[in-house]
Image (cartoon, rainbow, N blue to C red):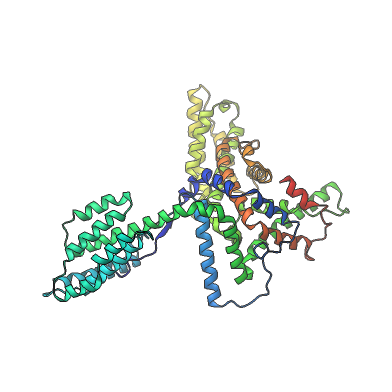
Amino acid sequence: MPLNNERPASTSSGEDHGSDGESSSKRCDSMMSTSDLDCSRESFTSDCSSKHCTPSSSPPKVLTLDEVMESARDLFHLSLAHEITVNGNFHMEPASIPQDSIWKLVRDNVHKAFWDILASELNDDPPEYGQAIRLLEEIREILLSFLNPGANRMRTQIMEVLDMDLIRQQADNDAVDIQGLASYVITTMGKLCAPVRNEEIKKLRESTDNIVALFREIFRVLDLMKADLVNFTIENLRPVLQTQSVEYERAKFQSILDKTPSALDHTTSWIKSALEELLSATVSTEQTTGQGKQQRAMPGPFQILNTAFVGILTWDNERSPLPETLVTDEGRLREIQWQLQRCQAVNEVLLIVCSTIGGPIQGLPSLSDRLKRMTSVLLDGMHSPNFNLEKALEGVSAQICCELNKSLTERSYPALTPELQATLRGQICSITQKDNPIRTLVEDRVQQYFMALICDPKPKVKLEQVPAGLTAIKPELALMGSKFISLVNYNRTVYGPFYASIIRKLMFSDSTPAASPPQDTAHESVTSN
């Protein structure tokens, strides 16, 4: 049937990404064995000889179309396996086409033409069964694809009832019982479908439509059953993938790297930026303390990698592409970025309110919660390019002034003066400026919080230990921290050998700024991490 075999579309929405944080964290923790962690850590101080542990350094070459296509397939398989492994809500469903799209208009017209031809052939005198037989043959193949390897009796029965040679002979003699064959197909579908499709099968059995409409509905339900089978396979495959995911993803990425030597260019730039940031900070510190003449030590490998991972929280996707090793988690990382961006803005607003108004609103958790919810709602979607943050903050400040006046009046305090309201409004709107002291303070402390989580061998203990000034967003930070640490730990376990090779080259290459080699820095960072 033309255009009826659209590939199922994966369903992994932002809600899925957000809802499976804790379960994903548990799965990733269980998948990262001690040996995997040891392998990725020891690789910083020892050369890995196996092919999958060290990225190859082939000279630039021109890729053929076949190599590009093969790399694309490897990347698709890598992304699919990763999504199945870390996202417990991942499933497939038949592709949905936007109602007003040209593609839907074309598809509907082609389908209508196909079914009109079928109706015309069956209404001929004598009827023409060529199109109907081809449909039955396709249905037979779909039904056979649903069977387990050991279902020989059902397979034999389907082949006997839907015997195409026999049906063609019957068609030549105008003796085909199309309605009877359709009834058998529906009965067989009822035996093979998931329980969730029982209602659809019941509707097919009770259908009083003509045979063309019935065939059309049969194919619609078969598409749903195919998606069910894919999802059932995914559920059965997930435990196997979870036990083998680290080695599988590492081997797949190495396969991509073998065909595309430039597949680590963005990752190398990302890690190099972290190294340069640490060296720049070291120089600034030495100049401040007057130790510039002394030879400075190179940052440790885990310090470099931890700094790189924390930098992902403020990564600008428009300026620089995401590192290749993080592409499979791009959606989850962006979701964390967006949530963190909004939470920081909410916290900045609440700090300004508390510092401006002071005593009259101290010790009122219910008021603080109301202001927090209200601000969060008004700033929803602030990551969008079309979002006008300054205008939204004006609305936030106006609503906050109204809420504060209401609360103060209820407790016999004087309402805010126009001057104080104007001051509060101006301070809230000023957080759009990057050098705003409140904004800088909150962003720095959020960075400190995530850095502490990454550096700690038992980060779950520190999830609730937020720095001073971030108490208002403590639950949100803990949730985002859990998700982020889960992604980082799993990513470091899979790609640790590749990171080790890159860092070794950056630390000891001639292009690196002059610095003394660390005194057993790698060993110390491994034992302390």
Q: Position of residue 166 (x, y in %)?
A: 21, 72
Would residue 270 be found to the left or right of residue 394 on screen? right
Residue 387 visible here: no
Residue ID at (47%, 29%): 406
Q: Position of residue 240 (x, y in %)?
A: 51, 54
Nearest the eye: 255 or 471: 255
Nearest the eye: 123 or 138: 138
Q: Position of residue 168 (x, y in %)?
A: 21, 74
Q: Given the current orientation, which residue lies at the most extreme top position? A: 412
Residue 181, image quadrant: bottom left
Q: Is residue 308 above or below residue 182?
A: above
Would residue 6 be found to the left or right of residue 283 on screen? left
Quarter of the N terminus within the rendering: bottom left
Q: Position of residue 57 (x, y in %)?
A: 69, 70
Q: Given the current orientation, which residue lies at the most extreme left position? A: 125
Would residue 325 be found to the left or right of residue 396 on screen? right
Would residue 320 be found to the left or right of residue 414 on screen? right
Nearest the eye: 378 or 244: 244
The number of numbered discs placed on residues in the rendered structure image is: 0
Residue ID at (28%, 66%): 159
Q: Is residue 459 above or below residue 403?
A: below
Residue 196 visible here: yes
Nearest the eye: 11 or 148: 148
Residue 129, image quadrant: bottom left
Residue ID at (72%, 59%): 503
